[in-house]
Image: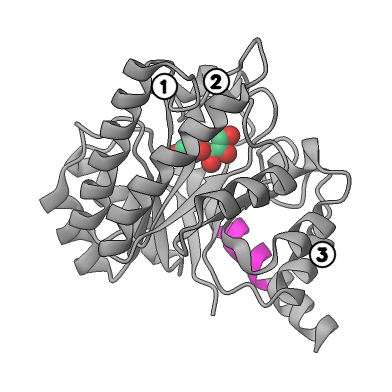
Amino acid sequence: MNKLGLHAFVWTAGWTPEDAAMAIRSTAELGYDLIEASTMDLKGFDVPATLRELERNKLGITMSFGLTSEMDISSGDAERTKRGEAHLLDAISLARDVGATHVCGILYSAFQKYATPVTADGILGSIDVVRRVAEKAQASGITLGMEVVNRYESNVLNTARQAIAYVRKVEMPNVKLHLDCYHMNIEEADSAEAIREAGDLLGYFHTGDSHRGYLGSGSVDFPSIFRALESINYQGPITFESFSSAVVGQPLEGILGIWRNLWEDSRDLAAHAKAFTDVQMKSAREALG
Ligand code: FUD
């Protein structure tokens, strides 16, 4: 059974004990199974408060983030690669301490717009680091999701096919693809076919519409996406992600280009996404029966 999740930025860009309590309680109230905490900054993360609220609300947790340019493990630069590896290892410790099942996002490069393509050495360096990080993650039962993002957010994994090749080279059972239909809508010729190609290598899935607003109000073909997920018998998390300038703040606002409000009411947006996803999953199950 897929666990349904909600990205914490639907509620708040912060993670003070008060932010965490509000985001976790609100996510659980709407019937989600997990919250995806965005851990761009590991230092501000209050582990005891998070654990207490997760327990109180019977909610699971996953984590996501992207590396900064100073931590770019695909840069081919020894210092930056070392900083990136240290950061990834710290993130795994944090994930273990809060009981996160998955750590995902742009873990393989910087999370930014690049001006030049990645080099072959850069990719090999990234794969080596991710393999070592995955070994530590494996000891705590954590799956790593390599998020395939559009060309403006990384120059390494922009298509499912690139990610399949990357993950096969990492050769760790807990390193999987993390696909997101917002990004796929930009880069893939056929998003449903890309999901089918990923098959068993798919470990995490983000839903988001073409403008990152209300699900179903943009141009993503959700019925075909959910049928593809059903056809590969995908059992991993499905997390809804949406960004509005009312919440997001820097650095994500700048990286993602969130310049306008697509919604005002977090609760209404999140409740709608849950109901929309339930309907899509049910129709896909019935269609493939
Ligand atoms: C970025 C994206 C996100 C990002 C995450 C970081 O475009 O899709 O999934 O990696 O929000 O927490």
Which residue matches tag 3?
Answer: 223
The residue lying furthest to the right in this view is: 189
Q: Residue shown at 38%/33% (left/top)?
A: 13
Q: Earlier in the sequence, mark 2 or mark 1?
A: 1
Residue 289 location, x and y as percent?
80, 89
Contact (Cβ within 8 Å) of mark 2 with mark 1: yes
Disc 2 target residue = 112
Is label 2's Cβ within 8 Å of ligand 1?
A: no
- Determine whether, in the image, residue 70 is placed left or right of residue 1: left
Relative to residue 217, is residue 200 drawn left or right?
A: left
Q: In this view of the protein, can residue 65 be seen by the observer? A: yes
Q: Which residues are magenta?
A: 271-278
Callout 1 crowding tier (Cα within 10 Å): few <14, some 14–19, many ≥20: some
Mark 1 lies on residue: 68
The residue shown at (23%, 40%) is 90
* Residue type for callout 1: Thr
Q: Main secondary structure of the magenta part?
A: helix
**Foreground tag (2 vs 3):** 2
- Residues packed near mark 3 inside 10 Å, few (<14), some (14 to 19) or many (20 plus): some
Whether residue 272 is in magenta: the answer is yes
SS state under label 2: loop
SS label for mark 1? loop
Residue at 68%, 63% in the rendered image: 276
